[in-house]
Image (tube, helix red, strand yellow):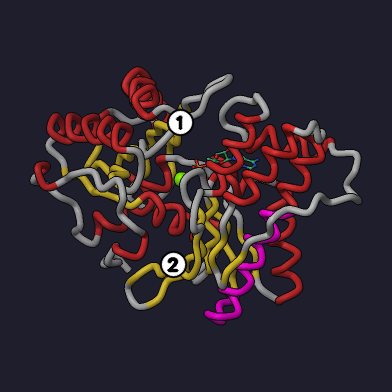
Amino acid sequence: MTNKQKYLLAIESTAHTFGVAVLDFDKKILANITDSWVSESGGMIPIEVRKHHKIVSEKLYKQALEKANITEDKIEAVALSNAPGLAPCLLEGMEFAKKLATKLNVQIVGVNHCIAHLEIGETTGAKDPVLLYASGANTQVIAYEAQKYRIFGETLDLGIGNFIDTIARYFGLGFPGGPKIEKLAQECKNKKELIELAYSVKGMDVSFSGIQTQIKNLYDKKTPIEDLAYSLQETVFAMLTEVAERALAHTGKKELLLGGGVACNARLQEMCQIMCNERGVKFFCPPKPLLVDNAAMIGYLGLKMFKARLGESNLDKIDIKPRERTDEVQVNWK
Ligand code: AMP
Ligand code: MG
């Protein structure tokens, strides 16, 4: 059997998104299907999100097999994002993965979701980048060194996406808030008058809670939301660009890679691109389906780990790790 006739099935379920992907053993992505929990008004409630995952999982699995044009008996391994994330969501994914692996009698590979965001960057051509990982729960500047992904800087309070979502919710917009704030920022008519916000960078760390309080207060005082959205983006994205630049200077690396849902933001991409041009650094940003939470990235890393014999036949040994940190994982597959 060639690598093209062997398949790995991957599952993502760390937070709002349930995803199923199929890859062949040459790492070609044959299907990458997602369904995300959304809300008109409130924020993410883990138990509700778990229910969503339970409802959509079987349907997504069938769609993924159909899209990849394979039958389930062709699956040779299952990759699962078992860390980090919201426990109820992780549990739903793990149950699904274990049922499937038992039925098909194949191994499960447990994949760290954050590291998957990093490794999928290889498909864009990045070889040894600094990663600016800007997602809902996570905001970190990461780079590889001596068998570990090291965290050079991170948020000291909220993840940038959660921060933006909280503001959006305060404005009465639904979840996810990022795209709505981006649109409002574009509609701002006072772009010359940046509202001064608590720009907060300490070394390579950032924090957002001060800005969050300021924006809520300004909103209560009837400051137009377009102006707030604009100043918010300009301020927090400048903070992220600054710490990414510092990490590039510190490590001497010549590539910057973006990852995470917030990296879909055109203004953040633009700021990073400008900084990279000025420094003579190459800038990489995966296409949106690989940037947001997705199962293809879990499969991509899962396949490498499986080939490095990091799959597990004893399914009792696979558990969720809601708080596993990027720099705790020993990289045994490179
Ligand atoms: P992730 O956790 O990586 O799936 O990313 C989800 C987060 O990305 C949520 O907090 C979204 O609000 C945020 N997000 C998605 N699109 C955008 C955007 N265009 N601008 C800013 N944030 C975004
Ligand atoms: Mg993510």
Give the amino acid at mark 1: Thr
Quick check: 327 left or right of 215? left
**Around disc 2, counting alpha carbons within 10 Å, would you say few (fewer than 14), some (14 to 19), or many (20 or more)?**
some
Residue 96 locus on image (x, y percent): 24, 29
Mark 1 beta carbon near ligand 1 (under 8 Å): no
Quarter assignment of residue 331: bottom left
Query: How far is disc 2 from disc 1 in space, using C-alphas?
Result: 28 Å
Q: Is residue 69 left or right of residue 158?
A: left
229 in relation to 270, above or below:
above
Which numbered tag is attached to residue 126? Answer: none
Can you say whether 103 is above or below 320 in the image?
Answer: above
The residue to which callout 2 is attached is 151
Evaluate whether residue 334 shows in this view: yes
Q: Quadrant of ligand 1?
A: top right
- Residue at (51%, 64%) from the top-left corner? 141
Residue name at image x 16 percent, y 45 percent: 318
Check residue 236 for magenta coloring: yes
Residue under circle 1? 34
**Which stretch did the figure color magenta?**
235-254
Q: Secondary structure at mark 1?
A: strand
